[in-house]
């Protein structure tokens, strides 16, 4: 024998809540979220424009460096063909033309000297290795990207000797 939980079945309809937000409510919330995001981004770019400039972005994503104060950084969009099958000057067989192209990238760079007066402001500990005063003093440093290119060039120059058919 079934006994209803409610005395009157019509009360069941009035006690059930809505099945969920309507499409109109969902669209309204979505529009408000999008407008809030756009307004926030617009305000941020107007209140702190220097943060979105070339130097501001670099300072945000890199360690302190004296080179940043001497560069006028400008951005431009460049499209690269990263295909492994597309040959370019850097991937050709060894020869003077290829060596010149690699040198133009800066693979034969020399270490920089950071003056003692700004060493701490760029993250150098004063007890790190120093250049002797008779050679001008300061702290030796490298530009990391050029160091990586230098090592890649050394691999390029020597790896073919280890190749076995």
Image: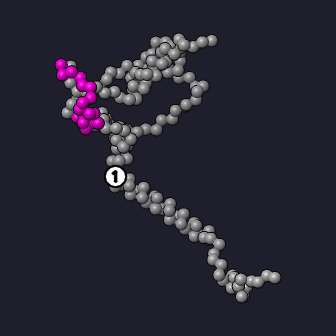
Left or right of 6 on screen, residue 149: left
Tell me: 107 left or right of 28.
left
x and y percentages locating residue 130 in the rendered image: 24, 25
Q: Residue at x 34, y 38 (%)?
A: 63
Q: Residue at x 38, y 57 (%)?
A: 43
Which SS type dominates the magenta stretch?
A: loop
Q: Is residue 153 magenta?
A: no
Q: Quadrant of residue 119?
A: top left
In percent of the image, x 31 and y 38: which residue is there?
64
Identify the residue at image location x=28%, y=36%: 122
Could you tell me which secondary element the residue under label 1 belongs to? loop
- x then y, percent, for residue 54: 36, 41
The residue labelled by disc 1 is 48
How many residues crowd around disc 1 within 10 Å: few (fewer than 14), some, or many (20 or more)?
few
| Residue 16 left/right relative to 116 | right
Q: Is residue 74 above or below residue 99?
A: below
**Range covered by the magenta-colored residues:** 118-134
Coloring scheme used: one colour
Q: Position of residue 31 (x, y in %)?
A: 53, 64
């Amino acid at each position: 024998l079934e006994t209803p939980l409610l005395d009157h079945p019509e009360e069941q309809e009035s006690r059930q809540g809505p099945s969920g937000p309507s499409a109109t409510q969902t669209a309204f919330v979505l529009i408000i979220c999008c407008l809030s995001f756009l307004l926030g981004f617009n305000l941020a770019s107007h209140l702190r424009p220097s943060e979105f400039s070339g130097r501001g972005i670099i300072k945000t994503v890199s360690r302190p460096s004296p080179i940043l104060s001497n560069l006028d950084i400008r951005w431009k969009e460049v499209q690269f063909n990263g295909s492994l099958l597309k040959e370019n000057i850097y991937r050709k067989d060894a020869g003077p033309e290829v060596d010149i192209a690699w040198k133009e990238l800066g693979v034969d760079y020399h270490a920089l000297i950071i003056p003692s007066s700004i060493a701490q402001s760029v993250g150098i500990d004063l007890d790190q290795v120093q250049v002797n005063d008779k050679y001008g003093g300061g702290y030796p440093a490298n530009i990391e990207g050029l160091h990586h290119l230098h090592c890649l060039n050394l691999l390029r120059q020597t790896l073919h000797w280890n190749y076995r058919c």
